[in-house]
Structures are given as C-alpha cells and as structure tokens.
Amino acid sequence: MFERLSSFFILIMVGLLASQASANTLAPLVTPSVSTAVTTNNTPLMVQQSFAQWRAGLRMEAVNQGIAPLLFEQAFAGLSPDPQVIAADQSQPEFSRPVWEYLDSAVSSWRVARGKALLAEQAKTLQAIEARYQVEPSILVAVWGMESSFGRQIGSKNVIRSLATLAYEGRRSDFWRSQLIAALHILQEGDISPNGMLGSWAGAMGQTQFMPTTYRQYAVDFDGNGRRDIWNSSADALASAANYLSLSGWQHGLPWGLEVQLPTRGFDYAMADGEQRKSLSQWLALGVTLRSDEINRKHLAQQSATLFLPSGHQGPAYLLLDNFRSILKYNNSTSYALAIGLLSNALQGDYRTPAAWPKHERMLSHKERIELQTLLNQLGFSSGNADGIIGVNSRQAVRSFQQAQGLPADGYPNDALLDNVRKAASKVYSKQLQR
C-alpha cells in the first residue's frame, strides 16, 4: 500500500517542492558563461569564463562573420554586463494580468484618440505604405501604439550592452548571441550609430520594437534617405511593420476576427482548441452568431476560422481568421494579437465593448499554475513540464480533465478548475490508502 502511495503522492510533493525552491532561489546577478574543455583522459570539464574572455571569443566569431574589428571595438568600448538586464530576465511575476485588464489598457481612450489623430496626420504616408504592402493603416497604427506608444517609448537601453549581457549570462545564450551578431551587422551597414541603437532590456529596437534578426529581414527605407531608421523615422517604422505583416501572410480587405455569441445550451467548447478550423458558414451552422450585422457574410462565408475563448466559456468569444495568425507572427501572444485587432477596430470607429468578462474569477498565481500542471500530470493528463506557463499542452490537459469530469471543456485554468483538480487528486490518494 505504502509503495503504491509513494508512486503517486510523493512525486507530486517533490514536483511542488522543487518548483517552490526554484521560484524562491535567487540566481547571481551575472552567471559567467562556460566553455567545455577536455582533460587528458577525454573527460569534459566545464570552465568558467570571465566577461573579457567571453568578449574575446565573440570578437573572433564576429570578425569571421564579416564584422570590422574597429567597429567591434567601438561598439564594446567600456562595455560591461548590465545587472538590470539580468534582473529583468530572471524576474517571474507571481500573478498574471487578467486579459480584460490588459485590453482595457491597450484600447484606452488616450490610445484611441492619439491613434485617430495620427491616422489623420500620417494619412499620405500610410496610404503610400498601404498601396505598396497591402496592409491597412489602422492595423499599422495599432501596432505602432502597442509597441512604443506611437514612438514615445522605444526604450533607453544600449542594445549591444543588453544583448551582450544576455548572451554572456548563459540562459538561451545561442539565441542572444545570434541577435548580438545581427545587431553588429546593423551597425556596420550604417543604419544607426552605436549610441543611437536603443531599445528594451531584451534588445527590441525602435518604434516597432524589432529584434535585430527581424530588423535585418524586414526593415525598409521608406522615406528614401538611404537608411532603415526605425528609431527616428515613423515612415520607416510603419513601412517596416507593413512589410513584416505582408510577408507573414496578411490579406488586405479581410478582418482579423469577429466577435460572436455561442449557443447557451449543448455547445461543445472543446472546439475552441485553436486546431479546429471551419469556414464561417460552418460555424454559423453550429449555432454561432455574429455580434455585428454589418459583416458581408457572402464575402466571408468560406473564410477559415478558429474559435477563441480568451477567458473561457464565461467570457467573450471570437472567430479568428488568417490575419490573426499574421499578427501572432509579429508577437506570439494571443492577448497581444487580440489587443491589436480591437485597437484597430477602435481606430476605425468600429469598436464594441466585448461581452462581459468573468471578472469575478481569480487568476492563478505562478505557484498555483505549477501545482495545477503537476497534479494534471500525476492524474494522467499530460501537461508537459510543470513550469507555470500555460501553453498548448497545458490547455489540452485541462480540456481533457474537464471532459473527464463532465465540465465545459474550454481549456481555461482558473481557481475553480484548480479546486476540482485538487479534489480529483485527493480521491485518487484516498483510493491508494484503501488498497
């Protein structure tokens, strides 16, 4: 009996204690990079590098990739790791912000008013961008507003220093190193000076917050001055965003999505898994209705869409079209993409307050999300690594648990769901004791 108990319950406790220890343990501000050496008996030996040693290795790699030695020295002159960047990278908020609070901020009255003013002020430029890239002005201004508050908040961090800090620190070092090399190429190409290359702590740059590799692939010189300047030229920034969306599959003249109402009885919420794509006419045949009467149904009838429930079955529902996926390629966050879509609608004077949000629900803390994932795994509903990040696997595990319990299978984790999972785990534990 006790051996069977340990196989189930002890693993739960180990997972919870390990995750709590991880959350409560503070890593050093700067963790030196490591390199692998080999001893005389071919045994790998991890050797810590100083920042100066790491810099020397990076310099060799950069020069081999075509970076001029003089430019490298100028970019790294007096540069040291930034403790603020490490702190930001290691921070883990205890509670997630509810989607409705995020959207309230995204579609604030100030942002809508300022965006409408800029649509008028930049009309000639935006029309020229639309003609070339086939992306509507309202979407571009919405991206502009969300990324940098229309160019007002581009970040004040030295991008080379931030990326060097992240690449040296060790976590995802290969990714940050590739971004750093790309940033050096941008400097060498002459689009911006080292002092002018400012951005966020994570190296996102300019009015459109492009990462260096994204910049090199998508940034354009739209104002014709010979430089792709997304820091100081709104024309370059907006056209670069348009080029990104266009090459990500944006379809001109089609909406990003539609708010809908679901049947009150008998609807299978498990269809809102992001994978089940149906034409708009097929969704309507299932009893889904559009909130707006102004949509040309014939024009959209065969457009493929997925059902999205951002706050579960008790909140608003949306049918997402392919343009939503294009926004996700810009920033792979459904809340972000929804904010862009709703802000774009508002800038066109077509914003409707979404159906009521379940504001009575409490968001799960980071520790509670880890507990939820751990318990789901132990109950046989695989949610992947218990890291507190509710992704595709975790939502599918939640959905499977809800189906097994006869609950609306919307895949939405809230405090009521966690309580049900705890009760289910307790029942299994009790049955183990009785054997």
Image: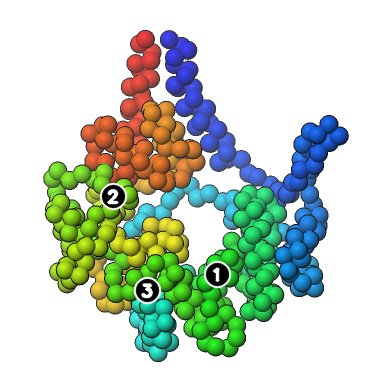
Q: Secondary structure at mark 1?
A: helix
First in sequence: mark 2 vs mark 3: 3
Name the residue: 44% across, 16% down.
5
**In the picture provided, is 357 more to the left or to the right than 425?**
left
In the image, residue 322 lies at what x, y percent? 33, 62
- Which residue position is annotated with label 3? 139
- Which residue position is annotated with label 1? 217
| 20 over 189 or under it: above or below | above
Q: Amino acid at mark 1?
A: Gln
- Which residue position is annotated with label 2? 276
Check disc 1: other Cα within 10 Å, few if <14, some if 14-19, many if 20+: few
Q: Nearer the viewer, mark 3 or mark 1?
A: 1
Name the residue: 41% across, 34% down.
382
Q: Secondary structure at mark 3?
A: helix
Quarter of the figure with the C terminus = top left
The quadrant in which residue 214 appears is: bottom right
In the image, residue 162 lies at what x, y percent? 65, 62
Measure the C-alpha gap from mark 2 to mark 3.
26 Å
Q: Secondary structure at mark 2?
A: loop
Name the residue: 37% across, 69% down.
250
Q: Nearer the viewer, mark 2 or mark 3?
A: 2
In the image, residue 215 lies at what x, y percent? 56, 70
In this view of the protein, can residue 355 be seen by the observer? no
Measure the C-alpha gap from mark 2 to mark 1.
32 Å
* Residue placed most toward the observer, 121 or 34: 34
Check disc 3: other Cα within 10 Å, few if <14, some if 14-19, many if 20+: many
Measure the C-alpha gap from mark 3 to mark 1.
20 Å
Name the residue: 38% across, 83% down.
131
